[in-house]
Image (spheres, grey):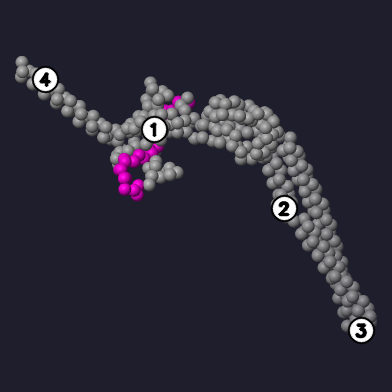
Amino acid sequence: MNIRRIVILGLVILLGGTASVYYYEYQEAHPSTSDAYLGMHVVEISPQVSGSIASVAVHSHQHVHRGDLLFQIDSQPYQLAVDKARADLQQASQSLAASEAQMSAAQAQVNSARANWEEVRRHSERVLDLVAKGTLSRDEGDTASRSLKDAQEGLAAAQAELTAAKARRGAPGDKNAAIRVAQASLSQALLDLQHTRVMSPGEGTLGEVDLRQGSFVDVGESLFALVETQEVWVDANFKETDLLRIHPGQSARIQVDLKPDKTFKGQVESLSPASGSAFSLMPPENATGNWVKVTQRFPVRIRLLDPLPDLRLGASSEVSIDTTLSQ
């Protein structure tokens, strides 16, 4: 009887030891932590134009999709700006047309002055040739020379006026500076008018929405937050002694306190280059006589491969990483 008890006790001890060894090896190959929290992208909703709120289309904690209207800013001042910009563009186009007409008239004057100069030059050459032969008097030669000089000065004046007309017009068509400025002003006015309708930049859940019709908002003023639900991860804080076995690409099992009956699949994305305490506003000061060594924890980001839309930012989680397979 005593021998049987000894055998049973020995088997129990052996099984216990085997189980302990297996558990230790499993824990070594699958480091885990419950110091982990869900992370999501948070977008601060801010207007790109200022004005009074005309209407609010959402409420606190509402789920929205990309492109959904969140609120509307009074668009009347921006519509007036668009109308003015269009009028300025039309005026610039009319001014350009007038400059084109002036330049065409100046070009016509140049053509006429050049034709006159060519005719006077030929006549002057004939007269001077006859003066040289003694057929005509010197006075007639002097008159011909003065006419040629007057024709040259007339052509130069016409060419100067054409140059001035080209300068007043500037570049032709859509390359004209005044047209480009007016077009840019119109584009900006249209963009500002578009920004009076504030749309959701992504899919997610809104935070506290405390907007009322008639309230005035400024450009860049943070009004409320949108928690995007399309990309979810876990920031898990592992002991520094576990980091040597953790690498990006390894698979992970995640349990979220919000969903205790479901286990999520994950994948290690990155490891922080510094401990959590190193990023704090007041890092610990260890240069004291009563220093005690404390195992540090380093954030490890793990992406959820199968997130659910009702997961919430900051929820407590538990993570276990399989370090037996590395990529």
**What distance separates the C-alpha of mark 4 from that of mark 2?**
99 Å
Instruction: Residue 123: name its quadrant.
Output: bottom right
Identify residue type, mark 2. Ala
Label 2, label 3: how far apart the Cα atoms are: 60 Å
What span is in magenta?
Answer: 286-309
Choose top left, top right, bottom left or bottom right for residue 3. top left
Check residue 8 in the rendering and tell me which mark sits there, or answer none: 4
Q: What numbered label is drawn on residue 134?
A: 3
**Residue occupying the point 43% across, 29% down:** 315
Q: On the rendered image, what quadrant is the C terminus found in?
A: top left
Name the front one of labels 1 and 3: 1
- Please tell me which residue is depicted at 61% across the width and 38% down the height of the picture: 221
Specify the label residue 121 is tagged with.
none
Location of the N terminus by quadrant is top left
Q: Of the residues under marks 4 and 2, which one precedes in the sequence?
A: 4
- Picture disc at residue 36: 1
Q: Amino acid at mark 3?
A: Gly
Q: Which sits earlier in the primary sequence, circle 1 or circle 3?
A: 1
Residue that protrudes farthest toward the front in the picture: 289
Distance of mark 1 from mark 2, alpha carbons? Answer: 59 Å
- Circle number at residue 177: 2
Q: Is residue 304 magenta?
A: yes
Snapshot quadrant of residue 250: top left
Say which element carries label 4. helix
Which is in the foreground here, disc 4 or disc 2? 4
